[in-house]
């Protein structure tokens, strides 16, 4: 086969065969396809798009460019994927909750991307935790704790690893086909029986409109179902951070509050909805409502926290972290309160701007080699619709230095809107696909 012929066919709007896509994905993985060819391929797909069949074939070809995990367990293998948001630490609640409901959850996760936080960076805010483990270790932790949240090894979907880096520098990230193949090649490599997709929409998400979110949700769920993985998508609001905190250790603290029953906010609600859907899809619940009740019971009873503790201990966390977490999480040296500059209702939050403020505090990366500061971020953010008196606390900044805290405080003030009238607060759960 010839990369030039495949690219030329795509340029003419024709679809390559599954065999051609398999050959191209292997070439990405083994470097026999050049960077120039990969860039031209990505641009042709970006401009002309793929049909369902070719998108599915590209997804499977990229999955099969590396290892595909095999399981022999006494319960279904489940997974969740979020398209990315701010204050989105649902995975850390949901994975152990599903494990406590009889499922196994080998969750291959990512790091922060753009303004959004990354699950691996959050986990690594816990002293001692390492998320880069071998496939054997992933299997062992999944078997014993019921869940393992880890980074992809070099053997998982290597074609995606290469193509993603090339898309990033060729203006070809924004293609539904390429995004779908990229996300699902990694998710399907873990061989889940059922998958739930949390497609975020709103100011803190990549998809700002319902139309964009629906298109992504449909593309992902159609492709994953066609690949034999029972998949549902839920479109959820990212018009404000899910947890009242953004930043790695600060979000772990929010997770621990939910898992220990101290908090019952949107993080719990969304975990119940997503968990309910995937438990029903996997046959562990009669329907999504019963599944949601099972997730809630797993959390309220402390069984989910127990699973989380087992998983963390296996990944290097201090023994007893789940019981005494506040003692272990790092704290920033500078903590300052931001207050409402005027009276009114919190009517809008620019989630992307808040996420970027956390990145600039050091909680994310501006260049690949940046070390993430686990302690920094924003906490105690009041929810949309809150009635505020002038001078009332709006949020807290956690910074490594005064000047960084100052800049973040200004960024937060610029990112919120206070109005005389109460706003219409969007529903957390927008649509199920
Ligand atoms: N996440 C991925 O893994 N790939 C994309 O293309 C976009 C988001």
Image: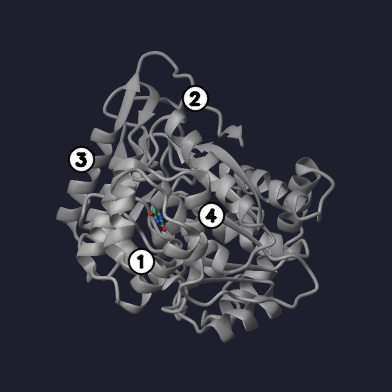
Q: Quadrant of residue 324?
A: bottom right
Q: Distance between the residues labelled 3 and 2?
A: 24 Å
Choose the circle earlier in sequence order: 1 or 4: 4
Residue denoted by label 2: 425
Specify which label sits upstream in the sequence, 3 or 1.
1
The residue mark sitting in front, 1 or 4, is 4
Q: Distance between the residues labelled 4 and 3?
A: 33 Å
Q: Is residue 289 left or right of residue 154?
A: right
For the residues bearing labels 4 and 3, Cβ distance under 8 angstroms: no
Ligand 1 neighbours mark 1 (CB distance < 8 Å): no
Front residue of this view, candidates 117 and 257: 117
Q: Are marks 2 and 4 in contact (CB under 8 Å)?
A: no
Sequence order check, earlier mark of 2 and 4? 4
Q: What element carries label 1?
A: loop
Residue 420 can be seen, yes or no: yes
- Asked where in the image residue 377 lies, by quadrant, the reply is bottom left
The one nearer the camera, 116 or 390, is 116
Provide the secondary structure element on which disc 3 rests.
Answer: helix
Q: In percent of the image, x 70 and y 80: which residue is there?
A: 144
Residue 92 placement (x, y as % from top left): 56, 61
For the residues bearing labels 1 and 4, Cβ distance under 8 angstroms: no
Q: Mark 3 points at which residue?
A: 410
Decide which of tag 2 and tag 1 comes sooner along the chain.
1
Which residue is at a point 30% across and 65% down the rendered structure image?
3
User: Does residue 71 sit above or below 53 in this rendering?
Assistant: below
Q: Is mark 4 on a helix, strand or loop?
A: strand
Q: In this view, does 209 lie above or below 104?
A: above
Choose the circle earlier in sequence order: 3 or 2.
3
Q: Which residue is nearer to you in this view: 61 or 322? A: 61
Residue indicated by mark 1: 374
């Amino acid at each position: 086969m010839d990369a030039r012929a495949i690219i030329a066919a795509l340029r003419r709007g024709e679809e390559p065969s599954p065999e051609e896509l398999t050959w191209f994905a292997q070439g990405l993985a083994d470097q026999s396809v050049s960077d120039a060819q990969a860039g031209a391929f990505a641009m042709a797909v970006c401009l002309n798009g793929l049909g369902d069949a070719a998108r599915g074939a590209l997804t499977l070809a990229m999955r099969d460019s590396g290892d595909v995990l095999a399981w022999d367990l006494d319960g279904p293998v489940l997974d969740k994927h979020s398209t990315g948001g701010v204050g989105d630490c649902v995975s850390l609640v949901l994975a152990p909750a599903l494990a406590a409901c009889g499922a196994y959850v080998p969750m291959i996760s990512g790091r922060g991307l753009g303004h959004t936080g990354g699950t691996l960076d959050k986990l690594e805010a816990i002293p001692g935790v390492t998320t880069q483990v071998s496939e054997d270790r992933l299997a062992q932790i999944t078997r014993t704790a019921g869940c393992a949240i880890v980074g992809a090894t070099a053997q998982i979907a290597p074609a995606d690893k290469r193509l993603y880096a090339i898309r990033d520098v060729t203006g070809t990230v924004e293609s539904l086909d390429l995004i779908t193949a990229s996300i699902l090649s990694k998710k399907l490599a873990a061989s889940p029986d059922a998958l739930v997709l949390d497609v975020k929409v709103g100011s803190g998400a990549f998809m700002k409109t319902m139309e964009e979110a629906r298109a992504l949700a449909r593309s992902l769920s159609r492709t994953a179902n066609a690949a034999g993985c029972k998949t549902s998508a839920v479109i959820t609001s990212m018009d404000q951070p899910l947890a009242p905190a953004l930043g790695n250790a600060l979000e772990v603290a929010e997770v621990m509050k939910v898992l220990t029953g101290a908090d019952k906010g949107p993080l719990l609600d969304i975990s119940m909805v997503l968990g309910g859907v995937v438990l029903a899809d996997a046959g562990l619940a009669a329907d999504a409502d019963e599944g949601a009740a099972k997730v809630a019971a797993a959390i309220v009873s402390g069984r989910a926290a127990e699973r989380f503790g087992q998983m963390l201990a296996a990944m290097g966390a201090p023994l007893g972290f789940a019981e005494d977490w506040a003692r272990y999480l790092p704290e920033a040296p500078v903590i300052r309160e931001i207050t409402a500059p005027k009276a009114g209702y919190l009517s809008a939050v620019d989630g992307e701007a808040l996420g970027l403020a956390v990145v600039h505090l050091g909680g994310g990366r501006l260049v690949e080699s940046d070390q993430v500061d686990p302690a920094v971020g924003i906490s105690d953010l009041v929810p949309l619709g809150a009635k505020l008196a002038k001078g009332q606390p709006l949020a807290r900044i956690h910074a490594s230095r005064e000047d960084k805290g100052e800049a973040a405080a200004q960024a937060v003030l610029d990112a919120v809107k206070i109005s005389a009238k109460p706003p219409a607060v969007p529903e957390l759960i927008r649509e199920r696909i």
